[in-house]
Amino acid sequence: MLYKTKEAEHEERETAAMANGYGIDARILSQEEVQSLEPEVKVNVRGGILFPGDAHLTPQIFMNGLRDYLKEKSPFKLIPKSQVSKLKTRRSKPFRPIRVIILLMLLYLHAVHGLGLSRRN
């Protein structure tokens, strides 16, 4: 994540601290360090945050893998051509970020593949 202003730097530093708190490696880079990562491009930034563990993926392959994983391992069963009417939780505290990501992926699976969830018996 790159930034040009002090305000954005402050926000990105907070994001990096939060990520590190969750065990996700996030490194704060100076303009010079960002430039060294992109030597063929003139970088016009104040600095950036590097997430060394970040990677690229193909969404279709990832979502198909997630669907297959959930079919096998989830306490829920996937229901083809179903409708999601609401999401409920009994939690009083916020979800951990990874759980939010999984919920968003489930919604994506529903939207793209028409899959819903119900408890396994």
Image (cartoon, rainbow, N blue to C red):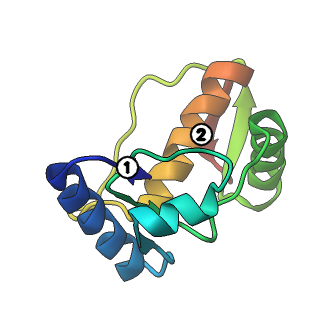
Relative to 83, residue 78 above or below: below
Question: Could you tell me residue 23's position as x and y percent?
Answer: 47, 81
**Type of amino acid at the residue the image marks with label 1:** Val
Mark 2, secondary structure of its residue? helix
Q: Residue at x 71, y 31 (%)?
A: 79
Q: Nearer the viewer, residue 115 or 4?
A: 4
Q: Nearer the viewer, residue 40 or 70?
A: 40
Q: Which residue is mark 1?
A: 45
In this view, the mark in front (1 or 2): 1
Residue drawn at point x = 62 percent, y = 62 percent? 37
- Would residue 103 be found to the left or right of residue 38 on screen? left
Cα gap from disc 1 to disc 2, whole angstroms: 36 Å
Q: Give the amino acid type for the residue marked by disc 2 in the picture.
A: Leu
Q: Position of residue 56 (x, y in %)?
A: 73, 50
Q: Is residue 50 visible?
A: no
Q: Position of residue 2 (x, y in %)?
A: 41, 51
Q: N-terminal of the two: label 1 or label 2?
A: 1
Read off the residue under disc 2.
Answer: 106
Say which quarter of the image contains residue 67: top right
Q: Looking at the rendering, which quadrant does residue 15 occupy?
A: bottom left
Residue name at image x 65 percent, y 59 percent: 75
